[in-house]
Amino acid sequence: MLPEYQRLLEKSAARYKDILKQLRFLAKRNKTGFDSLVAGFHDEVFSKINCLDCGNCCRAMSPRFRETDIKLICKACGRDPKSFKAEYLKPDEDGVGWVLRELPCPLQNEDGSCSEYELRTLSCREFPHTRSRAIQRKLAGLAHDSLVCPAAYLIAEKILALGL
């Protein structure tokens, strides 16, 4: 991980309680146009942050694997989906999909990049979920993601700077 990304995560950890408190408060409000505002912050931040230079999410949390994700990834790496599940995955809490048994993600290369980046799960593609609908109700999740993702921290800071 780049040192500048590590510094952002340290800032996030130091401010986490305050960020969580403020974002929880904001989540209770109903600001018109909030999704598009945050989507703009997402685009702005990700024009400067490169996920492939970080990869911390792959070391710190599991994405949800859908059956479609498993089939595509296994086809690309020549693995049997059943053996892939047995070796690396367990059912998620909701019983809807699968999560990793252990971290880091087995698809992460030593340099932090993803061996199946073009076929990554939907959960990975959408992380940190700042382009999702009704993001305002999910801001506590953004606070948590800011501990793992430097971009999520910067987006959270932009939201808080609005002073809504």
Image (cartoon, rainbow, N blue to C red):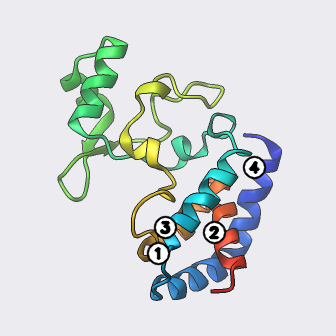
Residue at image coords 55%, 59%? 39
Dot 3 surroundings within 10 Å: few (below 14), some, or many (20 or more)? some
Q: Nearer the viewer, mark 1 or mark 2?
A: 1
Q: Which residue is mark 4?
A: 5
Mark 2 belongs to which amino acid? Ala
The residues tagged by marks 3 and 4 sit, at their Cα atoms, a distance apart of: 25 Å
Mark 3 belongs to which amino acid? Asp
- Which of marks 4 and 2 precedes in the sequence? 4
Q: Nearer the viewer, mark 2 or mark 3?
A: 3
Dot 4 surroundings within 10 Å: few (below 14), some, or many (20 or more)? some
Q: Which residue is mark 1?
A: 136
Mark 1 belongs to which amino acid? Gln
Residue at image coords 57%, 79%? 20
The circle on residue 35 is 3
Q: Is residue 77 left or right of residue 103?
A: left
Helix or strand or loop: what does disc 1 sit on? helix
The residues tagged by marks 1 and 4 sit, at their Cα atoms, a distance apart of: 25 Å
Mark 4 belongs to which amino acid? Tyr
- Which of marks 3 and 2 precedes in the sequence? 3
Q: Are marks 1 and 3 in contact (CB under 8 Å)?
A: yes
Q: Nearer the viewer, mark 1 or mark 4?
A: 1
- Which of marks 2 and 1 precedes in the sequence? 1
Helix or strand or loop: what does disc 3 sit on? helix
The circle on residue 156 is 2
Q: Is residue 39 left or right of residue 69?
A: right
- Residue 37 sits in quarter: bottom right
- Residue 111 sits in quarter: top right
